[in-house]
Amino acid sequence: MTHMEILAPSRTTPNGYKVDVSRGQRIGRVSSEWFNRPADERYLSLTDLHNSVKRRSERSKTRIVESEAIRVEASRDNPERLTLMLPNAHTTVAPTHWSFGQLASLVGAPATYLRQLPAALAGINLQYGLSTHRAE
């Protein structure tokens, strides 16, 4: 019979790991991409990222609605922000970057161009596209 002894791992440094800056390389693109993100998409750790994604998934809901029933609204208080009013909903929904792109492609409009327009003008174009869209 073989005797096996399992030892608990011991850490030689009680303060965590030390980074050796003389090894590796500096990649400026990584930090520039981090700084170019909106403030709500900058995470200092994987734990922060995980918690943010978990909270977002807990708040998310899925509904199937007809595109012509969606109402696009632009507020005078915030001229750069569009909101969507869904049928039988009590509050408006702010589209994410991805969902705005999906909505724009649904109506055949270039999302990059619509993002450059004032919200009121982009809203008019999206609303027209949604009301005349017949591909569903």
Image: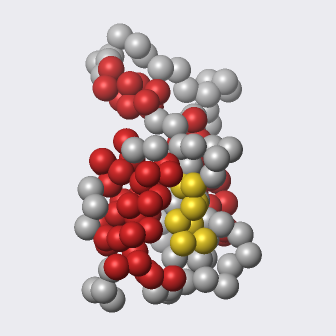
In this view, the residue in front, 22 or 123, is: 123
Mark yes or no: residue 68 visible.
Answer: yes
Outermost residue, right side: 90
Relative height, residue 117 to residue 27 (above, below): below
Q: Is residue 15 left or right of residue 35?
A: right
Query: In the displayed structure, does residue 100 sit left or right of residue 10?
Result: left
Using the rendered view, name the quadrant where residue 55 is placed.
bottom right
Quarter of the image containing the C terminus?
A: bottom left
Residue at 49% across, 49% down: 119
Could one spot residue 48 in this view of the protein? Answer: no
- Image x and y of residue 83, in percent: 58, 60
Seen at 52% across and 37% down, the residue is: 38
Side of 18 relative to 47 (left or right)? left
Name the image quarter holding residue 31.
top left
Q: Nearer the viewer, residue 42 or 44?
A: 42
Query: Which x, y percent locates residue 69?
Result: 51, 82
Residue 95 is situated, as x and y percent measured from the top left of the image, at 52, 60
Residue at 27%, 56% in the rendered image: 110
